[in-house]
Image (cartoon, helix red, strand yellow):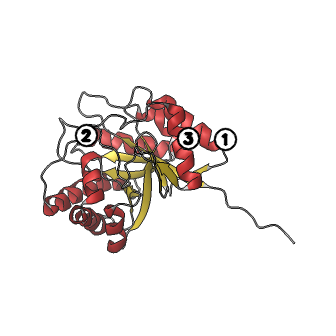
Amino acid sequence: MKPFAVEPLTIDINCDMGESFGTYTIGNDEAILPYVTSANIACGYHAGDPLVMQRTIQLALQHGAAIGAHPGLPDLAGFGRREMAVSAAEVYTMTVYQVGALQAMAKAEGITLHHVKPHGALYNMAAVNPALAQAIAQAVYKTCPEAILYGLAGSALLDAGKAAGLRTASEVFADRTYQQDGTLTSRKLPDALITDPERAVQQVLRMITAGKVKTQQGNDINIQADTVCIHGDGPHALDFARYINDTLTKKSIQLKAI
């Protein structure tokens, strides 16, 4: 009797990109792209501009990375990381506007969008606010229904995406700590960011292989990992991207876009 074949573990590594604009350069997209499988490209609100959007799409295509829209709040000065008092109607229209912009850029390069992932404060707000989550999900469904909606694992955004008829992907973070309710620790609080590469990689491995993550409160919670986010704008972003890619590969975890 032949033994059953064991399917290898697979994971998508995504990274926020295209966040330069005008004369300002943010991140190191070209160097990091070989180590990720999906690129979330800023759409001009929190960062990015038309030329950067086009160039980032072209770079991602060269490296075989899946291309997604990364819509954020209209807060260039705050890099989209500050909450704003926006209504569900405003969130719907700003998401349609930004996804539509990147969708047109992608079409001009002969491709379609693979996914949509909200950025920063918009992402965190939609994780816990069902009305905002529904607005984003409807915007994606109306503009790009074939795209996968990336959202925080266990969040209202994923629930809204499924209800809208979208494919969804549960996202986990390599370099962020978690709260007991599954939300990310606010960047305003101590220990929100994990700066030790080994600690970050061990967190990722445990989320992928065991479906668990330890919270700041010291307890384990269940978590689903379809895609892992790494950030490309830190001082050691390239070294970490290379390290996490190498470590997961050595653990026989297959890296590929969803």
Q: Spatial distance from mark 3 to mark 2, Cα to Cα?
A: 31 Å
Of residues 226 and 40, the one nearer the viewer is 226
Hey, what amino acid is under mark 2? Ala
Look at the numbered disc 3 and give the secondary structure of its residue: helix
Residue 256 seen in render = no
Do tag 3 and tag 2 residues touch (Cβ < 8 Å)? no
Image: 51 above or below 166: above
Q: What residue is rendered at 44% in x and 27% in y?
A: 236
Look at the numbered disc 2 and give the secondary structure of its residue: loop
Of residues 3 and 212, the one nearer the viewer is 212
Percent x, y for residue 182? 38, 54
The mark lying in front, picked from 2 and 1, is 1
Residue that badge 1 annotates: 250
Residue that badge 2 annotates: 47
Hey, what amino acid is under mark 3? Gln
Residue that badge 3 annotates: 202
- Image quadrant occupied by the N terminus: bottom right
